[in-house]
Amino acid sequence: GAVVSQHPSRVICKSGTSVKIECRSLDFQATTMFWYRQFPKKSLMLMATSNEGSKATYEQGVEKDKFLINHASLTLSTLTVTSAHPEDSSFYICSASSGYEQYFGPGTRLTVT
Amino acid sequence: GDSVTQMEGPVTLSEEAFLTINCTYTATGYPSLFWYVQYPGEGLQLLLKATKADDKGSNKGFEATYRKETTSFHLEKGSVQVSDSAVYFCAQPGGTSYGKLTFGQGTILTVHP
């Protein structure tokens, strides 16, 4: 089956620094990748949709300058949390799609101290 | 707009008990419907799906039937195991982006021995 990886799985950073999270589709080409944020005991909130080679489409209320998304190839998308603050601490999940179905990565736990 | 509503959790059951997690949807047409499962510390996995009315999706002993009369897609399992402890999300395609999903709020299931 389709496999999506995320790196790192956990990261702790200091307030004010930037963190990059990678999402890779390992055995298929993903024309579209999605980034979600999940708060404790809450559902997934879609942050943005990215298509290879074009700018990401952000959901309402998501700051583009704070959550930078790059989809440089058909197998890699990155999410950079810039100038991170404790309120950015969360579980970030990516998914990749080559058509109709989405395949989810294992998630990245970000803790900002 | 299109939405998905799940029963509030958490749900706590003893091993071998019968499980039902309710899910209802609102949509203008007849969307495909999905159940995803998230095990502790992991991303989401597709559990089962149904693409048209009266379809029954099934996997790992779980079943859900697409009922357009009641706009429902309830998840059931006849005999749960401790290993079924997870968060379950009902979802349907949503929004204008191709492949985008709209999730229910998630239901936490805990199964005790």
Image (tube, rainbow, N blue to C red):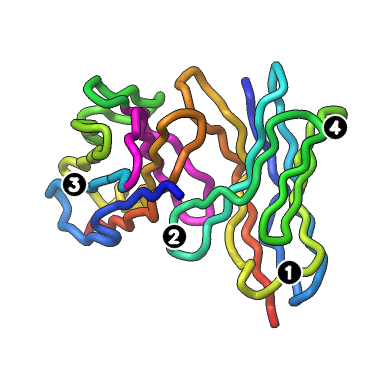
Label 2 Cα neighbours within 10 Å, binned few <14 / some 14-19 / many ≥20: some
The image shows residue B49 at horizontal and vertical percentages of 65, 41
Q: Residue at x 79, y 29 (%)?
A: B53
Total marks in image:
4
Q: Amino acid at mark 3?
A: Lys
Q: Which mark is residue B70?
A: 4
Q: Residue at x 14, y 46 (%)?
A: A18
Question: In the image, B97: left or right of A67?
Answer: right
Q: Chain of mark 4?
A: B
* Disc 2: which residue: B42
Q: Amino acid at mark 1?
A: Val
- Between residue B28 and residue A89, name the one nearer to us: B28
Q: CA distance from mark 2 to mark 1?
A: 20 Å
Q: Which mark is residue B72?
A: none
Q: Residue at x 65, y 75 (%)?
A: B82
Q: Is residue B7 visible?
A: yes
**Segment tinted magenta in the rendering:** A27-50
* Disc 3: which residue: A20
Q: Chain of mark 2?
A: B
Q: Quadrant of residue B34?
A: top right
* Disc 1: which residue: B80
Is residue A43 rendered magenta in the image? Answer: yes
The residue most toward the right is B69
